[in-house]
Image: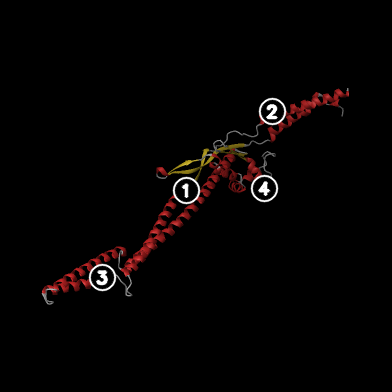
Amino acid sequence: MKASAFTPRRLKLALIALPMALGLIYYAVIASDRYTSKSMIAVQSALVNPGSGGAISLGTGAGLMGWQDTLYVMDYVHSATLAQELDKRLKLRDHFEQSRADVFYRLWPGSSAEWFFKYYRSRVELEFSDVNGLLTIRTQGFDPEMAEKLNRAILDSAERFVNEFSHRIASEQMQFSKGEFNAAALKWQAAKAKLVEFQTVNKILDPIAQSTAASALTAELQATVARLEAELKSKLAFMQPDAPQIVTLKQQVAANRAQLDAEKARTTNSEGGDRLGTLNTQYQALVLDAAIAEDQYKAANAALEAARLEAVRKLKSLVIVEAPIKAESAEYPRRIYNLLTLLALCAIVYSVVRLIVATIQEHQD
């Protein structure tokens, strides 16, 4: 075909009029309205202020690490797991496969699960702002009711996801700390029980105090016996042995010596060892075990309280900044915008082709 056949009129018809006519037919007859529903969310952590008696407040943290949970939610919303769940709840396949829908934007019947997941992600748009950490969720549907239902269902599932994983982490940490605390409490109770049993069996409250008191009493009796014997010897030098004063002193010496022997027998065992010393050693060992167990109990109690505060701090909450609403007008397709864009493209293509044809005609002449 000669270049002269490509007249400006024919080029306008082929490159501008025909594409615009097809575009008008498509957007007027074939294209289906697609409605959108928008919501904005963020994940906040519970912050505990120790200085205010453990008061709890909400905060997002700073930087990317503070928004890590929101990024988890973002991945969850676009996950195949949620897509399957929403399909069962809302019959997404039936909605997006309806025959009246736009052939270019509907889900074809019999599509594979993988293709359905890709289609689902294309109908659920996510936008994360690294300025304020907010996640924007836009859902599309061929009617405003489905777009709103889909957005609300995603928010419900996301909130359940946040609650489950945050409570699971907090629960595991608390269970471990409670186990350590219970073990320390049982150990302390066992140590105290052994100490009480020791005191009951030996019928002695405090061997240390008893040993001190017995030593003081023995020393006092020994001193008394020595004093009385010295006094007896001095009086025997000038008095008869059967004198009343001598008899009285002998009785006092015998009584004090008998008491001294009784005290010595009470503080020694049958083998002649130091009974109170042995009991004292056993008692000190039991007291030390009880003290160590008490210290462990106090440490476990402090660790449990710290774990409780840490568990509260790890609790997450899904905050809905903007709730989804039912759309009143379709956002897609943007007919006027798309037609003007198509017209601009056709004009550019026409100008380029017209220039090429003019160049070819000039060389042929």
The residue under the point 69% across, 33% down is 27
The kind of residue tagged 2 is: Leu
- Provide residue 277's location: percent of width, then percent of height: 33, 67
The residue under the point 47% across, 44% down is 46
Please tell me how crowded label 4 is: few (under 14), some (14-19), or many (20+) other residues with Cα within 10 Å: few
The kind of residue tagged 4 is: Glu
Closest to the camera, between mark 1 and mark 4, is 1
Q: From mark 4 to mark 2, how far is it between C-alphas?
A: 35 Å
Q: From mark 3 to mark 1, how far is it between C-alphas?
A: 59 Å
Q: Secondary structure at mark 3?
A: helix
- Is any atom of residue 152 visible in this view? no
The quadrant where residue 266 appears = bottom left
The residue indicated by pointer 2 is 340
- Provide residue 39's location: percent of width, then percent of height: 55, 38
262 over 293 or under it: above or below:
below
The residue indicated by pointer 4 is 114
Residue in the foreground of this view, choosing between 304 and 30: 304
- Is any atom of residue 338 visible in this view? yes
Question: Is 54 positioned to the left or the right of 36 in the image?
Answer: left
Please tell me how crowded label 1 is: few (under 14), some (14-19), or many (20+) other residues with Cα within 10 Å: some
